Amino acid sequence: MGVDLSVIIPVFNEAESVGKLYAELKDVIGLHHYDAEIVFVDDGSTDATLKNLKRIASDDRTVKVVSFRRNYGQTPAMSAGIENAGGRIIVTMDADLQNDPHDIPAMIALIESGYDLVSGWRKPRRDKFLVRTLPSMVANHIIGIVTGVRLHDFGCTLKAYKADILKGIKLYGEMHRFIPVYAAGMGASIAEIQTHHRPRHYGKTHYGFMKTIKVLLDLLTVKFLADFSTRPLHLFGGSGLMFMLASFFIGVYVLYEKFHLHVFAYRNPLLLLAVFLFLIGFELILIGLIAELIIRLYHESMSNPVYTIKEKINL
């Protein structure tokens, strides 16, 4: 039987914080009388995290636990939580206590007012400026320019969604932070709200500068999927035609030089450039045709999960 609210929390080596987070969530849920469940996804923790989650779940049947056999990453953990959530509204948040559960009611109120997705904006940010805050600001700005979805904080895990929007999005790689981009492509209405960001007191951060680099690389995939996922030939074929067109004009200029300026072709490097551009353009068109076949197979086939589950509790 479904519930009104599912709170999904990916967890990796957060043994000290999961108990405190659970207590805070139960206070908020009880205060606002939500019909709610809490779905913890243990992403292959190597400390006492899973043991603590099992103890919590044994005392509270509204707590669900999905445990991975190894560490797969936050996006697969988020995907597993979504798949096993039964709520009409889904809230995602981190397990490190930096997201404040008391921000959840304001986000749910915006969902109830008609928005499909409400994204948190950590302000002020309680992280090291040069290592995390500054790279995040740069990445958020670039993502906004490339995708056209303007948010101050794509990386904030604290978000609220209508379940039907979220369950229609397939997640893989490191794509969880781009959910608003996918949702916007589906026509979802998006709101942003400032949330209370708290300093980390337990464990260590799993993020760093290289994470920002990976986000920017993933942005290329997101842009391709958003604009060309059903028509890759438009991208590859269009680029190929531009190269072939450039090759044609260079070839015409080579002929002009031969017949009017008496420059022999074998002495003219532009001839080689024209040939190379033509070959590159032709290959891009072929790649586009192959991509069309692959995309059609992808959309017509069933995708498999990118994780394996060791056990489930209360599910």
Image (spheres, rainbow, N blue to C red):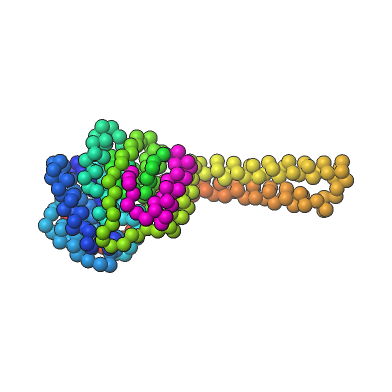
Residue ranking furthest to the top: 113
Mark yes or no: residue 26 visible.
Answer: yes
Mark yes or no: residue 80 visible.
Answer: no
In magenta stretch: residue 267: no
In magenta stretch: residue 135: yes
The location of residue 181, given as percent across then percent down, is 40, 42
Q: Closer to the camera, 117 or 139?
A: 139
Magenta residues span 121-149
- Residue at 70% x, 51% y is 276
The quarter in which the N terminus is drawn is top left
Q: Closer to the camera, 272 or 216?
A: 216
State which quadrant residue 226 falls in.
top left
The location of residue 56, given as percent across then percent down, is 15, 58
The quarter in which the C terminus is drawn is bottom left
Mainly helix, strand or loop, the magenta region? helix
- Residue at 43% x, 57% y is 209
Note whether 86 is above or below 60 in the view shown: above
The location of residue 292, given as percent across then percent down, is 51, 45
